[in-house]
Amino acid sequence: MYRNILVLVPTELSARPVSDGSISLAAACQAELEAIAIGYEASSIPMAAEGGAAVASIYEIERQRALERAEGSLRVFEAQAKNAGISYRCRAISALPGEAADIGGAAARLHDLTIVSQPERDRDTFDNNLAQEILFEAGGPVLFIPYMFKGAFTAKRIGICWDGSRLAARAVHDAMPFLKAADAVTVITVNEDENVASEASPTHLARYLAQTGVPVRLTSLKMDDSEIQAGILSLAADESLDLLVMGGYGHSRLKETVLGGVTRDMLRAMTTPTLMSH
């Protein structure tokens, strides 16, 4: 199982979903949980005051306010963590928005799993950008928790979104601790004849997963590209899946995150915790 887990606690969105999910998972895995909250400093401040000392004072006030926002978000997390009796530590950080992904990404590289909150498309917040950037910066699996999530996280019924690609394979390997402990696994393919190479077929994947001893079921969907995300989520609801596993498509370049279509749509509308790897 995962032994050290990082959770990025949002400071502009609700901290409760990722707190619920990460703390319950850490308790189940008996893992060390590190929580980081980043308060965002304003990237530009009106220069109403004259003189270097006055300007420095304004920036210091802004930095302190950002740090206080981070500390406030961690209070929610820490109260739950104490009650759960898990091993944890907390860090409140203030940073410019452009620095936040670098900080979070660097921290994620030295953890087995990173947990972030699903971006909220109706909210204009740096937390959304941070969650997406972490996918490309982490170098490992990122578990997105839906913003409507409540209660304890479990992964007894898992769906694998499989297209035979390198990223899908990376996600499967990264999710192996979950897969080995699952009760059932469903391999989901979309338009298999067009998209999946024969050497990486769902049948071959099922044979590979047989080592886990977990029952594997194959499901193939036929649909237009515009319907893929909705089709996967509908299947997840019908099958009562606890977790989806999929590759995270797109790239992060010059601080601009460009997501692939299905990845983008999934992040916008996910209703099931989703582990992505890039």
Image: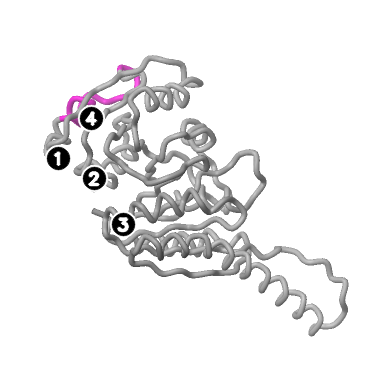
Which kind of residue does numbered mark 1 sit on?
Answer: Thr
Where, by quadrant of the figure, is residue 198 drawn? top left
Distance CA(mark 2)–CA(mark 4): 17 Å
Classify 10 Å Cα crowding around label 4: few (below 14), some (14-19), many (20 and above). Answer: some
Q: Is residue 179 above or below residue 72?
A: above
Which kind of residue does numbered mark 2 sit on?
Answer: Met
Which kind of residue does numbered mark 4 sit on?
Answer: Ala
Confirm whether residue 178 shows in the render.
yes
Q: Which residues are magenta?
A: 193-206
Q: Residue furthest front?
A: 83
Q: Main secondary structure of the magenta part?
A: helix
Mark before the other along the chain sequence, 1 or 2: 2
Which kind of residue does numbered mark 3 sit on?
Answer: Ala
Q: Which residue is mark 4?
A: 200
Which element carries disc 1, helix, strand or loop?
A: helix
235 left or right, relative to 224: left
Distance CA(mark 3)–CA(mark 1): 22 Å
Distance CA(mark 4)–CA(mark 1): 18 Å
User: Pointer 1 and pointer 2: residues touching (CB < 8 Å)?
Assistant: yes
Classify 10 Å Cα crowding around label 2: few (below 14), some (14-19), many (20 and above). Answer: some
